[in-house]
Amino acid sequence: MRTEAITFSERRGERRSRAVYIFGALGGILHGYDMGIIAGAMFFVKSEMGLSPQGVGVVVGSLLAGAIVGTFCTGRLAEAIGQRWMLIWAGVLFFVTSFFAALAWDPTSLVVARLLMGVAVGVSVTQVPSYLAEIAPKSKRGGLTSLNQLATSTGIFAAYLAGYLLAPIEGWRWMLGLAAIPSAMLAIGLLFQPDSPRWLVRRGRLKEALEALQINHSPEDAEKVFAEIEQMHRGETSKKDKIRLVDLLKMKSVRPIVITVMCLGALQPGTGINAIVYYVPTILKETGFSQNLALLNSVVLAVMSIAMTFYAGRVVDRVGRRPLMIGGASVMGASMAVLGLLAYMPKTAVSGYIALGALAVFKAAFSFSWGPIGWVLVTEILPSNIRSQGLAMTGTINFLTNMVIVSMFPVLLHANVAVAFGVFTCTGLLAATFVALRIRETTGRSLEAIEKDL
């Protein structure tokens, strides 16, 4: 009887543990879906609403403008109410704005809907990796935190698939409205999950913190981790809640760390990933594929991206962060170089499939490196007392860079294809060099141990 009781308890604990990670990562699915769906929907929105090329840029970029606001405002608010409640409210906002976007009656209403949706995206991008990192055991933190990128890749796949399946009926409103389903799941599911144990300790809710740790740790490990968190908390400044974003660069003790994570935040979109995500159907159509085949190939690329992200989650805690980040950036740069060189070749079926292959290699490299691991590293190397503020600043830099690239890419692509992809080639090499020179290995170490060495 006792063995059966223990087995039942362990199984129940495992189910609870999985639920925490699944619902926590749903924010990534919404982020990916809302990024990817506009790529297919824009074929029909453009003609129905009579959008100019500049208008297309405004509609696409409005999500990123809202995300900048969302990331900038999350720091102190996340410290006040916790990552879990930030994500619950983000789910509510995702739900409302999905319907708003689906019912848009003109370009202005669509831009407003995507601006507000972008706020929720900004919250999810910064809070999902933070929440997952703070509840995960150190031995599995890299793989479990990379669930965020796996969820994002899954969301992009769902968006491309919806675009392909709904294209025959030009159902762009259905494409945008379907995001309401995972939005509701996120908001409702997280109501029944624990807060981050580290946030609970900072709030003095010690019993709840230990209970939260016991969901994902053995009783012995939970006690040990709890003691480490408490010890670190006692050593933190009593003014930590008053730290503002503008104060981070003024604090000499953390300035090098803040500059490092800001650079990581800029280099990730600087590799060109968001230009590819937003415009891959357009790029493929320009290389000679039909609209239907371009959408179908986008789905295939998204499936491959999911597979590579899943692979990264399996190996990151064995291979380490640095090798994957350096190798991934190098391969991405080489793939962009191939796309740039294709500009000097005649447009044929062969060049079209070479472009498709280069895009596949690029997305695969991003999906096993900078996609899942970039935010893992940022979360790990930020000290706990400035983690929320640091993630907010990093997310703001990330989306600012993203918005500039997404806005400028069509112009560069029209003016000089070789230059457009040449810029991404250089950024990929710069990213590899930066990680090699500036980033220490964090694999297999607790957040508190990493913080002591900063």
Image (cartoon, rainbow, N blue to C red):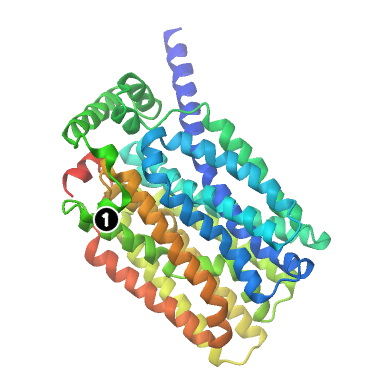
Q: Which residue: 42% across, 45% down?
A: 74
Q: How many marks?
A: 1
Helix, strand or loop under label 1: helix
Pinpoint residue 234: horizontal percent, then vertical percent.
18, 30
Q: Check the image and report above or below for 109 versus 343.
A: above
Q: Which residue: 83% across, 60% down?
A: 169
Pinpoint residue 230: horizontal percent, then vertical percent.
22, 28
Q: Which residue: 34% across, 61% down?
A: 264
Residue 249 falls in image quadrant: bottom left
Residue 323 falls in image quadrant: bottom left
Q: Which residue: 24% across, 55% down?
A: 257
Q: Nearer the viewer, residue 70 or 283?
A: 70
Residue reaching furthest to the right:
169
Horizontally, residue 301 falls left or right of residue 291, namely left
Please rate how many residues cluster around mark 1, counting C-alpha atoms within 10 Å: few if below 14, some from 14 to 19, many from 20: many
The residue that disc 1 covers is 258
Residue reaching furthest to the top:
1
Horizontally, residue 106 falls left or right of residue 374, namely right
Pinpoint residue 183: horizontal percent, then vertical percent.
61, 41
Would residue 87 be seen by someone viewing this image from the given angle? yes
Pinpoint residue 107: horizontal percent, then vertical percent.
70, 63
Horizontally, residue 289 falls left or right of residue 420, namely right
Q: Amino acid at mark 1?
A: Val
Residue 414 falls in image quadrant: bottom right
Would residue 160 be seen by someone viewing this image from the given angle? no
